């Protein structure tokens, strides 16, 4: 565990940090630009729906592509597509164009490219580091992603929006271009032994079957899906609760970005603490504690408008969410066979992330009819119910699944080595 993760890993780490910084700027820039066109909670929430809808519609196809083609090349295509679209949006903004519906189109297209990039990025990691180093590698990678996506990106996005729409959307273009350049320095072949003779539909079905028959991964996916529904409902309307003179919190655009950095700071600390928590508390106990911490993230604004109190809740929630992510992603990367990892990741994310557009729509509807505090309170109750999942997600079951996958991986490696090494002299003499 103390050995170097290797130069290719750190190049991927740098590329991911740059790409996630662009995502962090976009995450704040989109709703802040949108409130210049409309004050409707439903339309603002609808923007979050459009941004996350591709995870519901395209995630399975993205996973099949990640197992069929070179994963690094797919990451390059995803970032190139996002940079190109945003560059076109900058030109439109400079010409004085723009509307809420243009932002909807951008959110939908960028979200689609994100499904390809993120699925491939999560699937490529076991090809760069050993199984024993996955928790450590994921922790370092999450630290970079969360620092840029949530700690640096949001306040930077707030300041950039104050400088103009073209500036706000031009910065992610530059960052994605830099990420592409760094990813080009990661040399090697990152495809699997996919035969290429099956159809995409058949490939998708195989990944879905594996997830469905694996109790641990299936329950974890459902639990993440429920939490993402709650957090999506919360954060798609939070900007209305927090920003502007008529809002409850009365924050400025940069102030809103800084509020979100509290969660990011906690997430960075949690990514480094995850390996320790997994070792000292056990995976099941650590995961149960993260659920309790996550309640703070979605429910606290229902009880106070104090930015410091809400920021502290976001900080603690960020720690626990990051611990959950590192533990569960590393477990999934160990359990799923390498040739199926892209499809298992996408099937998992279909369940886990496909609820985000539903949550965004739900948050908008609840806010429209019952008010913003009702969104935060009801979603807090939803997250508490996740504790029921811990009846199935136990240390015994996770360890058994991990050990079975390790035996299968070792057997597959031995078979591949035997097949490529040729027959032994004794076998040759016996023919």
Image (cartoon, rainbow, N blue to C red):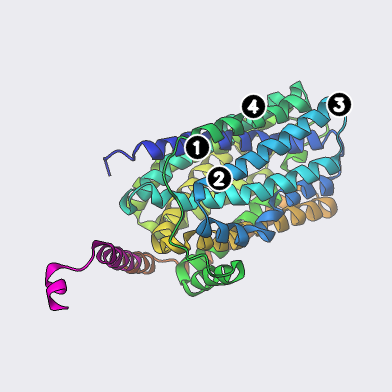
Q: Distance between the residues labelled 3 and 4?
A: 24 Å
Numbered label tally: 4
Location of residue 192 with respect to 104 vertically, above or below: below
Residue occupying the point 33% across, 54% down: 131
Q: Determine the secondary structure under disc 4.
A: helix
Label 4: few (<14), some or many (≥20) within 10 Å? many
Nearer to us of marks 3 and 4 is: 3
Q: Position of residue 403 (x, y in %)?
A: 31, 66
Q: Residues within 10 Å of mark 1 (few under 14, many from 20)?
A: many
Q: Is 222 situated above or below 242?
A: below
Measuring 55% from the left and 34% from the top, which residue is drawn there?
Answer: 179
Q: Do the residues labelled 2 and 4 touch (CB within 8 Å)?
A: no
Q: Looking at the image, do the residues carrying marks 3 and 4 touch, with CB atoms under 8 Å apart?
A: no
Residue that mark 2 sits on = 75
Tell me residue 393's x, y (percent).
Answer: 44, 66
Earlier sequence position, callout 3 versus callout 1:
3
Which residue occupies the foreground of this view, 395 or 379?
Answer: 395
Gap between marks 3 and 2 measured at Cα: 31 Å
Mark whose residue sits in front, 2 or 4:
2
Q: Mark 4 points at which residue?
A: 156
SS of the residue under disc 3:
loop
User: For residue 261, what is the image quadrant?
Assistant: top right
Magenta span covers which residues? Answer: 405-431
User: Circle 3 is placed at which residue position?
Assistant: 95
Which residue lies under the disc numbered 1? 183
Residue 92 is a magenta residue = no
Query: Between 339 and 126, which is closer to the camera in this rendering?
Result: 339
First-in-chain label (3 vs 4): 3
From mark 4 to mark 1, how far is it between C-alphas?
Answer: 24 Å
The reply to whether residue 36 is in sight is yes
The answer to which of 102 and 24 lies nearer the viewer is 102
């Amino acid at each position: 565990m103390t050995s170097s993760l290797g130069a290719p890993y750190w190049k991927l780490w740098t590329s991911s940090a740059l790409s996630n910084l662009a995502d962090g700027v976009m995450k704040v820039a989109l709703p802040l630009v949108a409130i210049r066109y409309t004050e409707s909670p439903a339309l603002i929430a609808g923007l979050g729906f459009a941004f996350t809808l591709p995870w519901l519609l395209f995630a399975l196809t993205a996973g099949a592509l990640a197992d069929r083609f070179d994963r690094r090349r797919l990451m390059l295509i995803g970032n190139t597509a996002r940079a190109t679209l945003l560059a076109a949006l900058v030109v439109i903004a400079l010409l004085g164009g723009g509307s809420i519906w243009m932002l909807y189109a951008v959110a939908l297209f960028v979200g689609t490219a994100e499904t390809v990039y993120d699925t491939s990025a999560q699937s490529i990691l076991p090809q760069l580091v050993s199984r024993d180093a996955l928790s450590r590698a994921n922790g370092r990678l999450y630290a970079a992603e969360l620092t840029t996506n949530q700690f640096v990106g949001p306040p930077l996005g707030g300041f950039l929006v104050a400088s103009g729409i073209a500036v706000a959307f031009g910065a992610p273009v530059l960052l994605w271009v830099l990420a592409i350049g760094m990813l080009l320095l990661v040399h090697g072949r990152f495809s699997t032994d996919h035969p290429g003779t099956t159809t995409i539909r058949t490939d998708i079905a195989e990944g879905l079957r594996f997830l469905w028959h694996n109790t641990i991964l299936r329950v974890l996916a459902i639990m993440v899906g429920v939490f993402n529904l709650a957090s999506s409902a919360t954060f798609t309307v939070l900007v209305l609760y927090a920003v502007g003179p008529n809002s409850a919190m009365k924050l400025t655009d940069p102030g809103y970005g800084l509020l979100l950095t509290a969660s990011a700071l906690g997430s960075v600390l949690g990514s480094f603490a995850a390996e320790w928590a997994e070792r000292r508390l056990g995976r099941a106990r650590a995961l149960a504690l993260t659920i309790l911490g996550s309640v703070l993230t979605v429910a606290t604004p229902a009880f106070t408008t104090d930015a410091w109190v809400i920021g502290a809740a976001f900080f603690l929630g960020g720690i626990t969410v990051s611990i959950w992510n590192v533990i569960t992603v590393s477990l999934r990367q160990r359990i799923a066979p390498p040739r199926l990892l892209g499809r298992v990741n996408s099937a998992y994310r279909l369940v886990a992330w496909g609820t985000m557009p539903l949550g965004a729509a739900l948050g908008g509807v609840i806010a429209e009819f019952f008010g913003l505090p009702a969104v935060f309170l009801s979603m807090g109750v939803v997250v508490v119910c996740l504790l029921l999942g811990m009846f199935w997600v136990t240390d015994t079951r996770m360890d058994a699944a991990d050990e079975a996958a390790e035996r299968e991986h070792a057997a597959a490696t031995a078979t591949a080595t035997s097949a490529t090494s040729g027959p032994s002299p004794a076998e040759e003499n016996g023919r």
